[in-house]
Amino acid sequence: MSRDTRFPHALRHGIVAALFVAGGAATAAEYIRPGVSFALIGDTPYGVAEEPKFDQVIAEINASRNVRFVVHTGDVKQGSERCDDEVLQKRFNQYQQFDDAFIVTPGDNDWTDCHRSNNGGYLPTERLTRFREIFYPEPGKTTGKKPMSVLSQAQVPGFETYVENIMWSFAGATMATVHVVGSNNDLAPWNQIDPSDSYATPRADRIAEFEARKSAALAWIDATFDRAIASQSAGVMIAMQANPNFELAASHQERQGFNEILDRLAARTKAFGKPVLLAHGDSHYFRLDKPMVLPVKPAGSAQLENLSRVENFGSPSVHWVEVFVDPRDPNVFSIVPHIVRANVFPR
């Protein structure tokens, strides 16, 4: 199937090149030197109505000559959709139509928000266990038609639960998924199954889950950068689900679930000194920017220039993003958004 690569303007932003091809029937390959890439998606499909649109995305990605694997940043279902096994299994089966390896990190819709009445009123930790069973059937190996071997945090003593945190190398870069979700990284109360659960009076099991997963995430971020340094990687890519609310003050309640993650990411990125790409979904808004600001002395702040953020498309925009990786390029990562013509609405 042909791919729509026509966009209104060209833009180069920091360490990451976003290519919006102008006019005609030109292909991305004519504007970016030949290389290998991966597909970035997330927050899709949202409900049965979007499943046919997502099939169009699968077909376009499968038709690519450059894509070697697919990364989904979580939310395999919409926020009002039930969290039943049948829904999760149906989405898993659809993702297995990708010709290459398929990688997913969980989203808040996939487990934390399953306490909602319209989701089935589930205990979120029970749904997380089930999500892991369905989407990570063999720790250390992805799914998809051409699974690839990866390093799973579940293979590290003390972190056996975290099958979803994986690491791999690709085209001279070190890459990883880290389980960090929306709903304030699970600090948002499970109040539809427990009205007494609140920020002021939190459930003990919810806080225990948050603290354990946060510790695993911090350790995995460190492990990713340690491996990148040891292997002299040209760059690092980390994918997670949550938009960590860069624009909010660290004291804001909606930042509390992300502060330690962002602090660790900032410190390791600054010390690494090479391009770092943070990929996430959650807010359903394709963007490419440099969102992290660090304090400097005396009083002031400075942009962390070697970290860029790319957010994938999300429902109702059912499209995909291609990430080229080239260690010969000082920017390492190049971003190409792909609009699926058949999914554009209104026509």
Image (cartoon, rainbow, N blue to C red):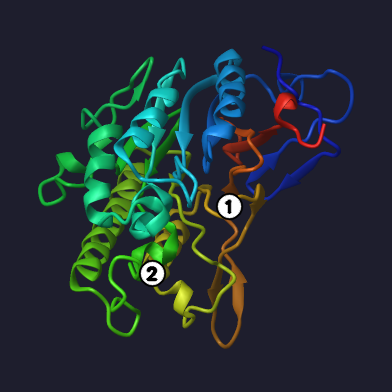
Residue under pointer 1 = 308
Where residue 322 appears, as percent x and y from the top left, is 60, 31
Q: Which residue is at the front of the view, 244 or 198? A: 198
Please tell me whether residue 135 is drawn above or below residue 3 in the rendered image. below
Quarter of the figure with the N terminus: top right
Instruction: Give the amino acid type for the residue marked by disc 1 in the picture.
Output: Ser
Where residue 331 appears, as percent x and y from the top left, is 61, 41
Viewer-nearest of discs 2 and 1: 2
Where residue 66 appears, as percent x and y from the top left, is 57, 18
SS of the residue under disc 2: loop
Quarter of the figure with the C terminus: top right
Mark 2, other Cα within 10 Å: few <14 / some 14–19 / many ≥20: some
In the picture as drawn, the residue positioned furthest to the bottom comes out as 298
Residue 100: which quarter of the image? top left
Q: Which residue is at the front of the view, 62 or 217? A: 62
Please tell me whether residue 54 is drawn above or below residue 162 in the rendered image. above
In the picture as drawn, the residue positioned furthest to the left comes out as 157
Residue under pointer 2 = 188
Mark 1, other Cα within 10 Å: few <14 / some 14–19 / many ≥20: many
SS of the residue under disc 1: strand
Instruction: Give the amino acid type for the residue marked by disc 2 in the picture.
Output: Ala
Q: Earlier in the sequence, mark 2 or mark 1?
A: 2
Disc on res. 169: none
